[in-house]
Image (cartoon, helix red, strand yellow):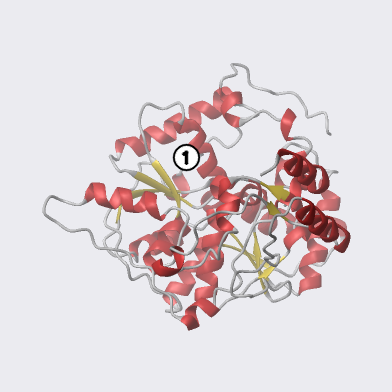
Amino acid sequence: MHSDLKEALIKTFDGRVAFHKIERELYSSDIGYLPAVAKMQIKSLPDAVVQPKSVGELQELFELATKYSIPLVPRGAGTTGYGGVIPTKGEIGYWVGCNASFNQETRNLPVNSIRILNKAGIEPAYLAQDEWCCGGGVYSAGCINEIEDTFKHNMEEFHKRGIKTLITSCGSCFYYLGYLYPILAQQYGVEYNIKVRHITDFIDELIRQDKIKLKFPLKFSVTYHDPCHVSCAGGVIDAPRHILAAVPRLEVVEMPHHGADTLCCGRHTSRYPKYGNAVITRRLNEAFDTNIPAMVTGCPTCETNFRNALQFSPRSLEIFDITDIVAESMGLPTLVGARIKKIIKGQVEAGEKPEPTKVFLSEEELAKENNLFRPHNETYGKLHARKGSIKTISETLGESTDNTSVPKSC
């Protein structure tokens, strides 16, 4: 791509233009299943992915494309190559959360979740750019007054869309939306009539109702990490184990501390690096002692913290979300399929052939997946302006002093 064009795109569209390979791959074709013969026809990636938000910006994009003689391939916002538009209203909604929307490494959670729900015939409503942070981070930092606007905005969006059941893959969002929001609703005089459910609880119900089938075997061993907000606070302990038990040939090895007795992932590593690092190390050591190749969890924050901590560990461990396992066993395309297949291949005994997990979707099944979710980074556009001054968790772990001061934002 011409350097002048790249600069012009960044200047015009700011956080709504992406050059990262992952983004370009996702938008080069539909994320859904493509036959091998079709994949052979895709020989190149777009140079950039642009998300204009107005007719004026669209006109500017056309002018740039004409000036630099480059082709434009339109792809509707929130749509797949099959043309389906994500619903914005409905009694069942899906809440993405900041982590999966803002973190490339955990975007598999919402992608998997929507695929699984669509397969069960459920097309949840999506808040898109109107989904603000749940406010949990602000609340836990002690900034009580600052959460009012966020809370009222989100509740207004739920009511406007007619959402009665809200599903989320994020442990923290599950806790704050389901347990803090009712308290805030009473405090601010706002009607609270929604039921918040963690994705594991909902998937367990779908399996029991025979609405989805986990039929493809995954022959390897995992241990399950219970996120604090989901298990200790939310009481969702049995559901993830029912799910893993339903996967053919998957072996689950429990760590000493599990269920309601789980150990924390060390969530507040950025605020309390010494303590957080010790908590993570203790939890990872329990996982290492099980001698299994992978840990499964049900929270993007836990997954992120473990990945960051493993950068400093001499031992290796794969981290998966439970929806990765479910989607693979259902035969749905996933963003971690290659990693799972590598583990399976490594655990196959001598002389035994690995059982392939074939991805096969009929035309009718493909039609049900038209509403594949794509996180919208522009929802959190304001964070882009600040990210240069925010230290990463990895950098913070190297600090020696815990931060106990009150945040200046309060």
Q: Which residue is mark 1?
A: 263
Local secondary structure at mark 1: loop
Residue at x-position 38% and y-position 52%: 338
Looking at the figure, which quarter contains the N terminus?
Answer: top right
Looking at the figure, which quarter contains the C terminus?
Answer: top right
Numbered circles on residues, count: 1
In the picture shown, does residue 285 fall above or below 136?
above
In the picture shown, does residue 342 fall above or below 271?
below
Nearer the observer, 389 or 197:
389
Q: Quadrant of residue 79?
A: bottom right
Nearer the observer, 350 or 250:
350
Q: Position of residue 275 (x, y in %)?
A: 55, 26
Nearer the observer, 99 or 245:
99
Q: Is residue 120 visible?
A: no
Q: Callout 1, which amino acid?
A: Leu
Q: Position of residue 153 (x, y in %)?
A: 83, 58
Q: Residue furthest left?
A: 351
Residue at x-position 76% and y-position 55%: 65
Q: Left or right: 328 with respect to 229?
A: left
In the picture shown, does residue 50 fall above or below 315?
below
Q: Residue furthest bottom?
A: 364
Residue at x-position 54% and y-position 79%: 367
Q: Left or right: 393 with respect to 57?
A: left
Q: Is residue 335 visible?
A: yes
Q: Left or right: 305 with respect to 390?
A: left
Badge 1 crowding class, 10 Å Cα cut-off, few under 14, some 14 to 19, many 20 or more, is: many
Q: Position of residue 224 (x, y in %)?
A: 40, 49
